[in-house]
Amino acid sequence: MGQKYDGLSHCKLALVFAVVMDVLGVTSLLVGIFASLEIQGEDFGDLLVYSGVLLVLFSMAGWVLWYSGNIEGLHLQKDLNGRLGSAMDRLARSVSRRMRLPRTRSSPS
């Protein structure tokens, strides 16, 4: 308990990726729905709708990475027996530790 918790500030790159993909995806989706986009008689609204949905889907990966990178800082609740939660909690903590710990290379002797 000696570590100071500094908020949800880990994995800032994943957070920026998720927000940018959300903004681009929602913008593309709304333009595809509400704008009349015909070029040489072809309608491109469906292309924007589908690409917007895909961008929002990609943003979910960024949100998952950002959340799993910050899960160590969240207060973990213990169940009635005092054990840690489910296997999913242990997996998320393991991934979070691996993402945060610097990798050291062993130098040849």
Image: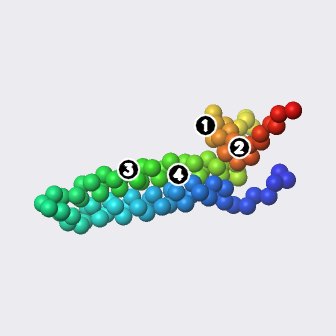
When asked about the image quadrant of residue 93, the answer is top right
Q: Which residue is mark 3?
A: 54
Q: Are marks 4 and 2 in contact (CB under 8 Å)?
A: no
Vertical placement of residue 81 versus 52, above or below: above
Is residue 19 toward the left or the right of residue 32 in the image? right
Label 1 to label 2: alpha-carbon separation: 14 Å
Q: Which element is circle 3 on?
A: helix
Q: Residue at x 70, y 48 (%)?
A: 100
Q: Residue at x 71, y 43 (%)?
A: 97
Task: Name the disc covering residue 62, or none.
Answer: 4
Q: Are marks 1 and 2 in contact (CB under 8 Å)?
A: no
Kindly report which numbered mark, 4 or 1, lies closer to the viewer in this rendering.
4
Q: Which of the pair 94/86 is nearer the observer?
A: 94
Residue type of the residue flagged with mark 1? Met
Q: In terms of sequence position, does the residue under pointer 4 or pointer 1 come before the other?
A: 4
Whether residue 79 can be seen here: no
Label 4 to label 3: alpha-carbon separation: 13 Å
> Could you say where residue 42 lies in the image, as x and y percent from the top left?
16, 57
Q: Which residue is mark 2?
A: 97
